[in-house]
């Protein structure tokens, strides 16, 4: 809609950060990172800290963390294991369902 301001960000491919590409862009209102499904040890807090330390300061969020019950590297046919997103974000981390 014309005349109505909208917040704009960029959804990077994971693991990745929008700030790697567009942090200085005037149109980027907030940063987004994707902590991804490629490893068990991606500390999404480190992605957030990196963005918060940039100048000018902009909000940041994990637009695509590891999902519950989806195995690490699911696109490679890897078996399901407990994910660790909960440990990094201080929320409960459920186990993947048995098959």
Image: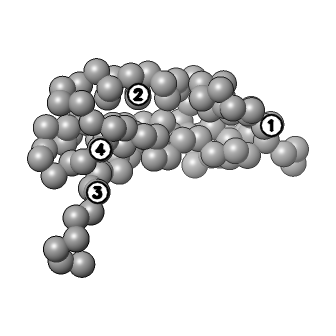
How far across and down, in percent of the image, does residue 33 sit?
Answer: 39, 39
Q: Nearer the viewer, residue 7 or 15?
A: 7
Residue drawn at (31%, 28%), measured in percent from left and top?
Answer: 51
Q: Quadrant of the N terminus?
A: bottom left
The first of marks 1 and 2 along the sequence is: 2
The first of marks 3 and 4 along the sequence is: 3
The reply to whether dot 3 and dot 4 touch (C-beta < 8 Å) is yes
Nearer the observer, disc 2 or disc 3?
Answer: 3
Rounded to the nearest angstrom, the CA distance separating label 4 from label 2 is 14 Å
Q: Relative to 61, does residue 55 appear above or below in the rendering?
A: above
Q: Secondary structure at mark 4?
A: loop
What residue is shown with label 2? 47
Rounded to the nearest angstrom, the CA distance separating label 4 from label 1 is 32 Å
User: Can I make out residue 40 in this image?
Assistant: no
Nearer the observer, disc 1 or disc 2?
Answer: 2
Rounded to the nearest angstrom, the CA distance separating label 3 from label 4 is 8 Å
Residue drawn at (16%, 52%), measured in percent from left and top?
Answer: 27
User: Can I make out residue 83 in this image?
Assistant: yes
Q: How is the image coloured?
A: one colour
Mark 1 Cα-neighbour bin, 10 Å: few <14, some 14–19, many ≥20: some
What residue is shown with label 4? 30
How far across and down, in percent of the image, does residue 20 sit?
Answer: 24, 34
Residue drawn at (18%, 26%), measured in percent from left and top?
Answer: 55
The reply to whether dot 4 and dot 2 touch (C-beta < 8 Å) is no
Labelled disc at residue 7: 3
Q: Secondary structure at mark 1?
A: loop
Rounded to the nearest angstrom, the CA distance separating label 3 from label 1 is 35 Å
The first of marks 4 and 2 along the sequence is: 4
């Amino acid at each position: 809609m014309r005349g109505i301001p909208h917040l704009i960000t960029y959804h990077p491919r994971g693991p990745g950060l929008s700030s790697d590409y567009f942090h200085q862009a005037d149109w980027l209102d907030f940063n987004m990172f994707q902590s991804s499904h490629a490893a068990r040890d991606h500390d999404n807090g480190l992605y957030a800290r990196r963005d918060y330390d940039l100048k000018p300061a902009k909000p940041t969020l994990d637009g695509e963390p590891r999902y519950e019950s989806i195995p690490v590297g699911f696109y490679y046919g890897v078996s399901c294991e407990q994910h660790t997103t909960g440990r990094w974000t201080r929320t409960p981390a459920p186990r993947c369902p048995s098959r």
